[in-house]
Image (cartoon, rainbow, N blue to C red):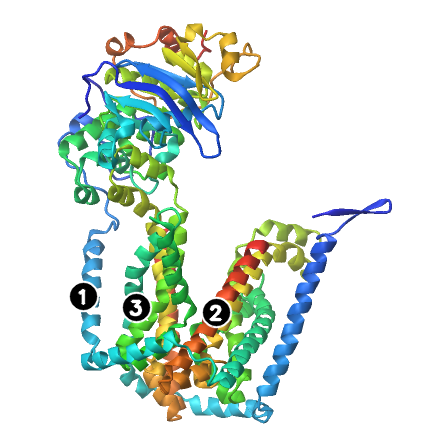
């Protein structure tokens, strides 16, 4: 499985992505993640967040710069080595990255395709250990009963959870999350964010979460990186993200308007880890927000 | 460590399967994907039947391999003919044939489009009364079931050899083609505009032109242009039974082994087909 | 839906003056073409025979009925041949059309050159009628069912490949991206990402073409390429119209049956 020995599973140095027409999406980004550290990437649309995330596993080819995953220089890998490296990088997309006509179980198992030969994967003969792991993950994200349902029969929140289970089945060392809450209602969004943070803690995963909802980011994630025009303009804890810094990132705006109350219906409640294992790794303020949520009140 | 899975998603599991208790209970149980065909009997019967069919069918084809070997030599002559197409020696026949084909196509498509409209309306369940519906559906079914060349045989008997028979044949086939598709379109329309117009007391003709026609018009144009295409292609073969067009010259050149002429004819036909396909693609894109 | 201002009032017309002009020009051109074509056909027609038509029709019908039902006994083998020509021809066409479709689809083609090649194959196959292919093949490899199968197959390659490539171009690429991100190989991405998305379209296209091919297969025998067209040709040549009627009835039943099968299968796939 994945290499957990390094202390810095992700090191990005002077990363640049320039498109042919002179448009520069990422302009010299430097980022380092410690093991188990979760980072939220915020910024206006077009700031380069999606591009940056996709450069890490080379779904987008960087123009220059270095990306080291577990000490391995990803940008220098050939095709076969890149595929092997991608096994250790879990990626979670918005809900539509599932294969609609396949069942939940098949979608989740496809996370292990990098470890299984072509014919075994054709006949869906995955090793029993993988199948058992899949059962556990499905139960952990709360959709074990749906395992033989076709993916297009699920709701948005359920599909998102399948995507999460698929990424985790890879047993990755780092997690890339691209807009996990973009098409979800407020309550489901919080459930998904909570789940992601708990899972990252349980599996000691480092994660980069691309997210547009600043309030959610501040609520759940201990480190926030603001991107604007392809350049990092903020890197620190949520407490330092005041109005002035938000303006740096997004431009002029009235940041004091209160967010709406969360009253929408959600899906089956997601399993929560036992408090002892999860609590110590979570961001400060999270526990309070948790409690407020469960009481149905707005966060303080 | 953990209790039972949350049963919040009530009623969503398959009706006859018990809820899987937990991952711990499932551990060690192999997983197989759900089979494509649910009925196990059918699942094995279908591939067996398919295999049996293929074996039987292949066995029934008796190939005269000697003849095929001889044919390879003839194929070489054919390719040589294609490499050097001869447009000149039979140009008069080619010219007449192509002009006939074009003329047949134009007349047949125009006539066919015109006549298919009443049949289509008559074959739409939501517009036509039952006896009219049954008659029109039957007529369209017959017009569609027979390949154009079979219909051509009839018309040749009735009106003699020549492009008139061909034009009538293709018109008849067009009625079948457009009639069915148009009738299906009419049956698929949003009924609300029609109901609304009926409620205003508009005459039947006005109801059709304001509620039905606008909904089917773009596809109708597209289908008509498509059928124009098909009609030209068909017009190049029905000459084999004497219904005019280039088919006659084509048949003659092949049976006389004058492959260079065949090549010339085919090149002209293909060129026109490509042209008309391109034009029809452009028109359909602009209309829809 | 443009509005023009005339004097003090706004006039609404469905089309701009320019569009109206173009539309009328189009109709005018069409009418001219029609007139020319009619003239031409009329010039080629022996009107003497046309005035005879109702009488001929009546004569024909009287000779067609009553149908010679006993002839049915000789038609089972040709019927079986016809079905085989259509089925095996479609299968062969599919085997060739699938790789051609992948080469032709903009999103799966390895190189633009392959795409052009695939498009060329598709276009040549589609422009030539199955009957013409049959004529050529009978001339080259001799009469028989084999010529019919190859003729039907050749024509179907272009049709199927075109529709298949359109289905491939329409797939959702996000799941493909996700599968790439897990480290799956190219073959696995095709198996898990592309095949499930195009499978229903593939099946539908195959059955649709088979249905059309049944119709084509009934007539390739007229030029010697096997199937029920052979006895049809023989009967008509011998002016045995009562036999021909039986064949027509059989063809009608066959086509209706194949359409029913095709509709059922396509409904089940959805």
Asked whether the viewer can see residue A244, the reply is yes
Crowd class of label 1 (few under 14; some 14 to 19; many from 20; radius 10 Å): few
Disc 2, SS = helix
Q: Are marks 1 and 3 on the same chain?
A: no
Q: Nearer the viewer, mark 3 or mark 2?
A: 2
- Left or right of B19 in this view: C123: right
Instruction: State how far apart marks 1 and 3 are (Cα).
Output: 17 Å
Disc 1, SS = helix
Q: Nearer the viewer, mark 1 or mark 3?
A: 3
- Left or right of C56 in this view: B8: left
The quarter holding residue B110 reads bottom right
Which numbered tag is attached to residue B52?
A: 1
The quarter holding residue C230 reads bottom left
Q: Which residue is mark 3?
A: C89
Instruction: State how far apart marks 3 and 2 are (Cα).
Output: 26 Å
Which numbered tag is attached to residue B271?
A: 2
In the image, B266 versus B17, the foreground residue is B266
């Amino acid at each position: 499985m994945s290499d957990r020995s390094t202390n810095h599973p992700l090191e990005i140095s002077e990363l640049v992505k320039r498109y042919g027409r002179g448009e520069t999406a990422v302009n010299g980004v430097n980022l380092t993640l410690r093991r188990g550290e979760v980072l939220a990437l915020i910024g206006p649309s077009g700031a380069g967040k999606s591009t940056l995330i996709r450069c890490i596993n080379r779904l987008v080819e960087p123009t220059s710069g270095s990306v080291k995953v577990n000490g391995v220089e990803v940008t220098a890998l050939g095709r076969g080595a890149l595929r092997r490296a991608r096994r250790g990088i879990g990626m979670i997309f918005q809900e539509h990255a599932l294969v609609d006509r396949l069942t939940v179980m098949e979608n989740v198992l496809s996370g292990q395709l990098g470890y299984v030969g072509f014919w075994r994967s054709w006949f869906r003969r995955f090793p029993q250990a993988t199948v058992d792991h899949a059962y556990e993950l499905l139960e952990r994200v709360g959709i074990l009963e749906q395992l033989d349902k076709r993916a297009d029969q699920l709701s948005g929140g359920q599909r998102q959870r399948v995507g999460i289970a698929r990424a985790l089945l890879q047993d990755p060392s780092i997690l890339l999350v691209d807009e996990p809450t973009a098409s979800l209602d407020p309550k489901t969004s919080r459930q998904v964010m909570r789940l992601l943070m708990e899972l990252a803690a349980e599996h000691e995963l480092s994660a980069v979460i691309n997210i547009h909802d600043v309030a959610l980011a501040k609520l759940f994630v201990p480190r926030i990186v603001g991107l604007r025009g392809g350049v990092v303009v903020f890197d620190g804890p949520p407490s330092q993200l005041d109005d002035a810094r938000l303006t740096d990132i997004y431009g002029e705006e009235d940041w004091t308007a209160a967010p709406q109350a969360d009253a929408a219906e959600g899906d089956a409640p997601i399993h929560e880890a036992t408090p002892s294992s999860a609590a110590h790794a979570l961001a400060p303020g999270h526990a309070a927000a948790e409690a407020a949520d469960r009481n149905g009140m707005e966060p303080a | 460590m953990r209790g039972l899975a949350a049963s919040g998603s009530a009623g969503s599991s398959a009706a006859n399967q018990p809820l899987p208790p937990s991952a711990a209970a499932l551990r060690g149980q192999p997983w197989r994907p759900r089979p494509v065909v649910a009925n196990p009997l059918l699942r094995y019967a279908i591939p067996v039947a398919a295999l049996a069919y293929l074996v039987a069918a292949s066995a029934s084809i008796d190939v005269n391999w000697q003849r095929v070997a001889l044919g390879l030599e003839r194929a070489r002559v054919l390719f040589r003919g294609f490499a050097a197409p001869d447009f000149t020696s039979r140009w008069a026949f080619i010219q007449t044939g192509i002009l006939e084909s074009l003329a047949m196509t134009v007349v047949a498509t125009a006539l066919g489009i015109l006549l298919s409209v009443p049949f289509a309306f008559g074959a739409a369940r939501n517009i036509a009364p039952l006896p009219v519906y049954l008659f029109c559906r039957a007529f369209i079914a017959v017009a569609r079931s027979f390949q154009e060349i079979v219909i051509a045989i009839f018309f040749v008997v009735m009106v003699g050899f020549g492009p008139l028979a061909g034009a009538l044949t293709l018109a008849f086939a067009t009625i079948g083609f457009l009639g069915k598709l148009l009738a299906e379109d009419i049956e698929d329309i949003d009924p609300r505009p029609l109901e609304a117009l009926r409620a205003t007391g508009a005459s039947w003709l006005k109801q059709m032109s304001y509620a039905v026609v606008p909904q089917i018009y773009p596809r109708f144009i597209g289908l008509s242009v498509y059928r124009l295409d098909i009609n030209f292609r068909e017009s190049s073969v029905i000459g084999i039974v004497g219904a005019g067009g280039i088919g006659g010259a084509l048949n003659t050149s092949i049976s006389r082994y004058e492959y260079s002429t065949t090549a010339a004819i085919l090149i002209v036909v293909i060129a026109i087909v490509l042209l008309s396909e391109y034009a029809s693609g452009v028109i359909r894109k602009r209309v829809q | 839906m443009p509005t023009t201002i005339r004097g003090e009032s706004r006039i609404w017309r469905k089309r701009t003056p320019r569009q109206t002009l173009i539309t009328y020009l189009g109709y005018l051109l069409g009418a001219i073409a029609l007139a020319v074509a009619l003239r031409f056909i009329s010039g080629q027609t022996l009107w003497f025979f046309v005035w005879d038509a109702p009488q001929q029709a009546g004569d024909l019908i009287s000779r067609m009925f009553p149908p010679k039902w006993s002839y049915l006994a000789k038609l089972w083998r040709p019927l079986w041949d016809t079905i085989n020509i259509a089925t095996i021809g479609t299968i062969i066409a599919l085997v060739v059309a699938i790789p051609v479709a992948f080469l032709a689809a903009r999103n799966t083609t390895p190189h633009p050159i392959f795409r052009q090649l695939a498009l060329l194959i598709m276009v040549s196959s589609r422009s030539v009628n199955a009957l013409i292919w049959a004529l050529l093949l009978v001339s080259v490899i001799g009469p028989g069912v084999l010529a019919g199968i190859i003729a039907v197959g050749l024509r179907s390659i272009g049709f199927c490949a075109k529709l298949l490539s359109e289905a491939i171009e329409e797939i959702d690429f996000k799941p493909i991206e996700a599968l790439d991100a897990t480290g799956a190989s190219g073959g696995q991405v095709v198996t898990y990402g592309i095949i499930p998305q195009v499978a229903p379209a593939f099946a539908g296209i195959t059955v649709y073409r088979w249905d059309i091919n049944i119709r084509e297969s009934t007539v390739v025998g007229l030029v010697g390429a096997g199937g029920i067209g052979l006895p049809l040709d023989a009967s008509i040549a011998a002016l045995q119209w009562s036999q021909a009627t039986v064949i027509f009835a059989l063809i009608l039943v066959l086509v209706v049956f194949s359409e029913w099968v095709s509709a059922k299968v396509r409904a089940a796939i959805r």
